[in-house]
Image (cartoon, rainbow, N blue to C red):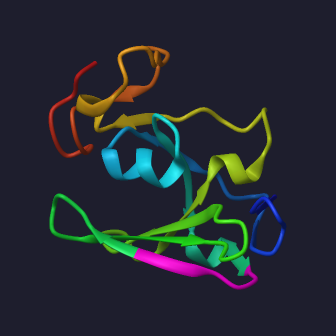
Amino acid sequence: MRASCQCGSLSATIEDSVEALVVACHCIDCQKRSGSPFGAIAYFPTEAVAIRGEAREHTRPTDNGNTFTTGFCPACGSTVYGLASKHPGITGITVGTIADPTFPAPVRSIYEQRRHHWVELPDTIDGFVRGPEGPRCR
């Protein structure tokens, strides 16, 4: 499996045999990072992911005192990967950069307190007010 930025300068190759944990996040930071009403990231074991090309990184604090780092292409600006300090052995790849309409749907939706009222998700996706450690909203 391959993911890449718009211009193709930054890419990720993911081993095909590895299953993804796909999460939709509606927090303000993911909205701003993605330029859309939510961000969707597929998480894989770090050893199953190979990043190639030049990346710039932006690290921000999270609500629970950790950090989240996004890696983006310095030429076109596409975010390709994310790293959560809370989960050091996992690398997230933005679902849009995989560009596969058959890619699995999210299994979890977080920060639904910030979800745009017109965004509807299937009832099969677990929803949380904030993070998965907190209360469910559906």
In the drawing, does residue 100 fall left or right of residue 74? Answer: right
Residue positioned 37% across, 75% down in the render: 59
From where the camera sits, is residue 103 visible? yes
Q: Residue furthest bottom?
A: 54
* Residue that appears at 57% across and 81% down: 56
Q: Is residue 53 magenta?
A: yes
Q: Is residue 117 above or below residue 128?
A: above
Res 4 quadrant in image? bottom right
Given residues 127 and 26, the one toward you in this image is 26
* Rendered image quadrant of residue 66: bottom left
- The image position of residue 29, as x and y in percent, is 35, 53
Q: Which residues are magenta?
A: 52-58
Residue 22 position, x and y percent, is: 54, 44
Quadrant location of the C terminus in the rendered image: top left
Number of marks in the rendered image: 0
Is 114 one of the magenta-colored residues? no
Asked if residue 128 can be seen in this view, the reply is no
Q: Position of residue 132 (x, y in %)?
A: 27, 43
Residue 61's place in the image compared with 122, above or below, is below
- Which residue sits furthest front? 75
Above/below status of 15 relative to 111: below
Which residue does the image show at 16% across and 61% down from the upper left? 64
- Residue 108: x %, y % from top left: 42, 36
Q: Is residue 79 above or below residue 136?
A: below
Q: Is residue 27 left or right of residue 15?
A: left
Taking 30 as reference, is 99 left or right? right
- Residues 3 and 19: in front is 3
- The quarter of the picture where the N terminus appears is bottom right
